[in-house]
Amino acid sequence: PPLHRQRHQFVIDFVKRNKPKKVADLGCGECGLLRRLKFHREVELLVGVDVSSAKVKKKMYGLSPLAADYLQPSCDQLCVELYQGSVTQKDSRLRGFDLVTSIELIEHLSPADVGSFSDVVFGYMTPVVVIVSTPNSEFNPLLPGLVGYRHTDHKFEWTRAEFRSWALKVCEDYEYEVEFTGVGQAPPGQQEQFGFCSQIGVFQRLGGKHGCNTFGDGAEEMFSYTLLFSIN
Ligand code: SAM
């Protein structure tokens, strides 16, 4: 399957195994991952955030209930919310999630904005798990005809060591642990040398699900994102 599907499949497999109830996808684009996550009964709240409202609006009605959902309502409720907003800004509606995903997003941010992203996601949203994917630049020589970055909007593409050093710093600063993996295999015998096409870090908050969140009920509300779509 194409690489973007493999990345989404990685998240779907994680959701099947871990059954998070509240899931947010940052940089959700045209909501492709959210449309697939909608079919997982354990999920109760599904949120998408993207800086581009045009992208989100393009296919967001695909997240509406199907006729069959009305004819045969399940007892499980699913709430879907889509926001226009930047991951460099804090919004209190994004706190306390079980899983936050950031698929091919950070390489679109300037270095200063990557700093804000770390602070907002790991320091403020404080989800139990964060899945981050980004291109592995060491794999680029295997991509035919590629000159420069994989996409003109990329601000950087990291080697495995560069991703690792950012991820370990995040863990140290915000009390997470991380495991590294990826999707898109190199040809047989060359995996070690080139790594995965997309590198992935799976971050777990130390203390896990039962660790105390840094915010209480009296935490201040802060709305900086614009609600585009909401459905129950
Ligand atoms: N995650 C989607 C996927 O897997 O198909 C889309 C990835 S696309 C390469 C990157 C997305 O990040 C775009 O939809 C872009 O609008 C969004 N984006 C870029 N900067 C952002 C920011 N500061 N905050 C939120 N989203 C951002």
Image (cartoon, rainbow, N blue to C red):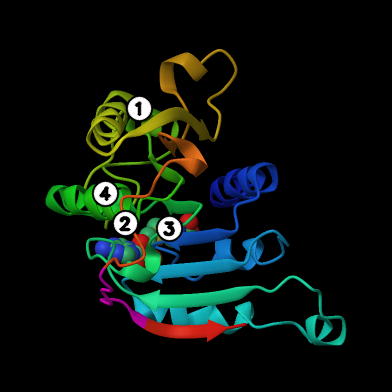
Q: Please report whichever mark, 1 or 3, sits nearer to the chain's N-terminal start.
A: 3
- Picture residue at 25% right of the left edge, 70% below the top: 220
Q: Position of residue 207 (x, y in %)?
A: 43, 35
Q: Position of residue 158 (x, y in %)?
A: 28, 35
Indicate the amino acid at tag 2: Phe
Give the alpha-carbon distance from disc 2 to disc 3, as whole Å.
Answer: 9 Å
Q: Would residue 41 appear left or right of 28 to someone viewing this image?
A: right
Q: Nearer the viewer, mark 4 or mark 2?
A: 2
Residue picked out by circle 2: 215
- Picture residue at 43% right of the left edge, 45% below the top: 130
Q: Which residues are magenta?
A: 220-226
Q: Is residue 198 above or below residue 43?
A: above
Quarter of the image that includes the C terminus: bottom right
Give the alpha-carbon distance from disc 4 to disc 3, as whole Å.
Answer: 11 Å
Secondary structure of the magenta portion, mostly? loop
Q: Name the quadrant where ligand 1 sits.
A: bottom left
Give the alpha-carbon distance from disc 4 to disc 2, as whole Å.
Answer: 11 Å
